[in-house]
Image: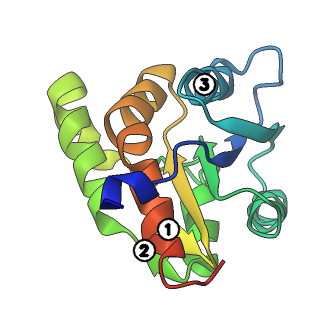
Amino acid sequence: MSHEDLVESEVNFHAVTVSSSRDSDSDRSGSLIRELLEADGHKVLSSKVVPDSLGEIEEEIKNAVSSDSRVLVMTGGTGLSSRDQTVDVLQRLEDKELPGFGELFRSLSYDDIGPRAALSRARASLIDDTLVFSLPGSPAAVRLGMEKLILPSIGHAVYEIDKEGTR
């Protein structure tokens, strides 16, 4: 059996949009996450919009980590304003940071938006055995992160987490 035969092809996800100005009807970024995941053969167990609130963001992260989900994709709350708290909560809860994700995201983003890409705090973390990706709130940023980084590597990432028998 080859390494590629062991890579997960269907992964359980949660999707969370952090925004105080969107709801489930106006959440284009969250809808795009669900659409891209399902088109790639993954299962979205839950999808929510939560306000920019430290407590609610933390609760959603903990809910995803304690569920059957293997991956949480978050959008929103990665900027510089005082309301942008997603990354701050994630840093406090994470067991491991995956710095390459944020670095690559900003590099790819630079090709689209120029130097403003350096202002993004996009991040990926491991909490217990759940991967958490935090993307900016724009649909363009979500599409970039999902298509160029998350979808092409998620099966391998889950395989790497599981290969030591932790799940």
Location of residue 9 in the rendering, given as x and y in whole percent from the top left corner: 52, 43
Q: Are marks 3 and 2 in contact (CB under 8 Å)?
A: no
Q: Residues within 10 Å of mark 1 (few under 14, many from 20)?
A: many
Q: Nearer the viewer, residue 66 or 48?
A: 66
Tell me which numbered mark, 1 or 2, is placed earlier along the sequence. Answer: 2
Report the amino acid beneath label 3: Ser
Which quadrant of the rendered structure holds the N terminus?
A: bottom left
Tell me which numbered mark, 1 or 3, is placed earlier along the sequence. Answer: 3
Q: Secondary structure at mark 2?
A: strand
Classify 91 as above or below 145. below
Which residue corresponds to the image point at 51% horizontal and 52% vertical from the top-left?
A: 8
The residue at which mark 2 appears reads as 97
Q: Residues within 10 Å of mark 2 (few under 14, many from 20)?
A: some
| Residue 24 seen | yes
- Residue furthest to the front in view is 1
CA distance for labels 1 and 2 = 4 Å
Which quadrant of the rendered structure holds the C terminus?
A: bottom right
Classify 108 as above or below 23. below
Which residue corresponds to the image point at 43% horizontal and 61% vertical from the top-left?
A: 157
The residue at which mark 3 appears reads as 29
